[in-house]
């Protein structure tokens, strides 16, 4: 036991050192923010095709037209303003997700990949965590990478029909407005979704059709056992492509951190309520109200 803390410190130091070297080597490639560039450079006139001037050939946009229409508004910003604003948003999301564990998370290599590329995995983690309190947040998940939205089954399993209706209703409302603005974009998106087979190259050889039932089972178990942290785990399993060499998708797991933190705080509040200001009162409180409880000056009861 006495070696646990030095071992943890050593692993953190190694993680930080590795990530510094990793980030430095990535910067030498000159591709910082290449996923963010895909969001900034959306072309609504030719949305679901490789952007010719994207950094090193990257820049294809695969999310729904509703998301593209929002990014098109942000495209009026200079690239460097968008990039640093987007990076600040990711860092702020990381800080909220990690809380007091944020510095520890910085030793996690997939996080470096996520911040370097500027993908939306941290935002997905945040939306999933917020989705328990604000179900409309699930619209962001369902309108971007889609399949991690398997987490909305949590509401169905627990028969929280109002929350399920809010999650799906908010998504449907956004889709309806977006479709009215540009029905052709939605037809093009549906067509593009059926033609993404080449993107699976470089991913783990576990088909999504096999992973989705597993993810649903994880959500079902978590909902039945009141374990919200299982939903980000299921969403990670249901990520469309589990890249082998680029594991930034693993940061979706960070969505479990605020849920675990909230559960811990709930247990602490419960424990504090059982003890009270003067000592343990749970046993006394367990006595039927019709039975008088005699307490001595210590508050422990007589």
Image (tube, rainbow, N blue to C red):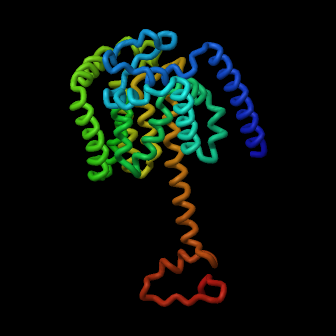
The residue positioned 62% from the left and 31% from the top of the image is 108
Image coordinates of residue 5 in percent, x first then y, are 75, 43
Q: Nearer the viewer, residue 70 or 280?
A: 70
Quadrant position of residue 176: top left
Image coordinates of residue 110 in percent, x first then y, are 57, 27
The residue positioned 66% from the left and 17% from the top of the image is 25
Image coordinates of residue 26 in percent, x first then y, are 62, 18
Q: Nearer the viewer, residue 156 or 19?
A: 19
The residue positioned 62% from the left and 37% from the top of the image is 105
Q: Does residue 11 appear left or right of residue 258 in this picture?
A: right
Q: Does residue 271 appear in this view?
A: yes
Locate the N terminus by quadrant: top right
Image: 103 above or below 243: below
Quadrant position of residue 209: top left
Q: How many marks?
A: 0
Image: 14 above or below 44: below
Q: Does residue 74 appear left or right of residue 81 in this picture?
A: left
The residue positioned 42% from the left and 9% from the top of the image is 52
Locate the C terminus by quadrant: bottom right
Q: Does residue 212 appear in this view?
A: no
Q: Nearer the viewer, residue 3 or 262?
A: 262
Image: 300 above or below 74: below
Image: 202 above or below 120: above
């Amino acid at each position: 036991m006495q070696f646990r803390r030095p071992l943890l410190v050593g692993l953190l130091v190694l993680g930080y050192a590795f990530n510094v070297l990793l980030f430095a080597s990535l910067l030498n490639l000159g591709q910082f923010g290449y996923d963010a560039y895909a969001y900034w450079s959306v072309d609504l006139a030719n949305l679901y095709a490789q952007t010719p001037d994207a950094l090193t050939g990257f820049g294809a946009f695969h999310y729904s037209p509703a998301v593209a229409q929002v990014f098109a508004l942000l495209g009026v910003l200079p690239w460097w303003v968008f990039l640093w604003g987007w990076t600040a948003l990711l860092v702020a999301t990381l800080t909220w997700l990690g809380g007091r564990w944020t510095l520890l998370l910085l030793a996690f290599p997939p996080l470096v990949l996520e911040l370097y590329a500027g993908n939306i995995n941290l935002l997905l983690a945040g939306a999933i965590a917020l989705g328990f309190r604000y179900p409309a947040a699930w619209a962001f998940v369902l309108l971007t990478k889609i399949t991690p939205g398997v987490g909305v089954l949590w509401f169905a399993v627990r028969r929280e029909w109002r929350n399920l209706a809010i999650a799906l209703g908010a998504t449907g409302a956004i889709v309806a407005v977006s479709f009215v603005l540009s029905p052709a974009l939605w037809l093009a998106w549906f067509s593009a979704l059926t033609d993404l087979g080449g993107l699976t190259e470089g991913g783990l050889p576990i088909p999504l059709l096999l992973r989705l039932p597993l993810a649903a089972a994880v959500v079902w178990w978590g909902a039945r056992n009141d374990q919200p942290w299982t939903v980000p785990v299921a969403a990670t399993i249901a990520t469309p492509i589990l890249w082998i060499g680029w594991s930034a998708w693993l940061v979706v797991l960070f969505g479990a951190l605020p849920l675990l933190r909230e559960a811990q705080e709930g247990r602490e509040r419960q424990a504090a309520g059982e003890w009270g200001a003067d000592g343990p009162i749970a046993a006394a409180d367990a006595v039927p109200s019709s039975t008088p409880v005699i307490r001595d000056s210590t508050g422990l009861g007589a």
